[in-house]
Image (spheres, grey):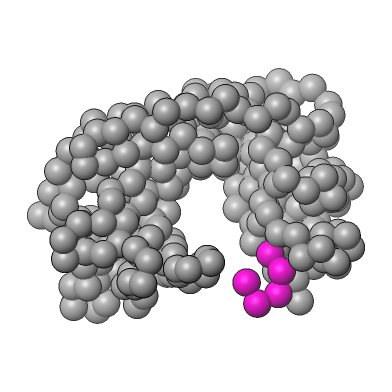
Amino acid sequence: MIRLVLAAVFMAAPLAAGAQAPSPAPARAAPVFRPWQVDWGQYYCSMIRKPEAGRPFATAFITSPGGTGTSLALVPEAGQQAPGDVDTVVLMPAGPSATVTHRNDPRERITLRRIYGLPQDFRAALARSTEMQLRNGTEVRARIPLDGVGAALGALSQCSSAVAQEWGLDVAALAALSRRPSTTNTYGITPDDYPARALREATQGHVIMRIAVSPEGRATACVIVATSGSPEIDGVACRIALARGQFLPALNAAGQPVAVQDAFTIFFRLPDY
């Protein structure tokens, strides 16, 4: 079975109809705030600490522009491994701690560990902490020093805001909502919608769509803001979301349904990935 992994970030502003992919965002130099580096990517912004003595893997905090969540990636050096059985992340000395899940992401020569379940206020808590511990139960599997993290967090926020604006998102309007829109049927996309040509050519990818959601919870327009690199995958994502997508509408501060834009990321992965 084809697996479609879906996630969403949300925003509010007027939207013109269409499904045309924009030009790629301009390349940027990665700011360095030693020992951290902030990476301005097409699909995400990340804050990275390179491997060090006694810790043969890089640590990357990854955010999606326009969203509030953060995930964690552990990237081992060639021939090394990152901790694979982490179930708790703890910020020292005062917390918070979070129960997390993880998924392996095999690459050509290494296997990344992706950790999910960090709370929405995790980035703010990072700035008040001196160390992050990766644990399995009560056993500490790795310690990540957080010296210099404050300046890097500032650059990470700037990155997220800049990319969100390039996507046509209104971050301030998003923050003013009392509820963000959410899909109730995974945008109507099923494994049978995986494009035949992409299957034949073993093409994978993820696409970010900016969708206009009406107060009644209908998708009224869709624009690709970050292409998967596959016209077939991009075309399926918007076409099916417009035809079948169902949503809980956004609510304003007064609790009234309002028309907004939101950006959704869909990962198209082949079997066994």
Counting labels gives: 0
The answer to which of 157 and 24 lies nearer the viewer is 24
Query: Residue at left 22%, top 73%?
Result: 141
Q: Position of residue 6 (x, y in %)?
A: 64, 57
Quadrant of the frame with the C terminus: bottom right
Q: Indicate the position of residue 180 as horizontal and vertical percent values.
A: 58, 40
Q: Most prominent secondary structure in the magenta stretch?
A: loop
Q: Going by the image, does 163 lie left or right of 247?
A: left
Q: What's the magenta region? A: 269-273
Identity of the residue drawn at 57% across and 25% down:
26
Instruction: Check the image and report above or below for 19 versus 59.
Output: above
Confirm whether the magenta stretch covers residue 272.
yes
In percent of width and height, residue 105 lies at: 51, 67
Does residue 268 appear left or right of residue 89 in this picture?
A: right
Asked if the magenta segment contains residue 212, the reply would be no
Does residue 86 show up?
A: no
Occupied quadrant, residue 58: bottom left
Up the image or down, 94 lies above or below 115; here it is above
Whole-percent x and y of residue 65?
51, 36
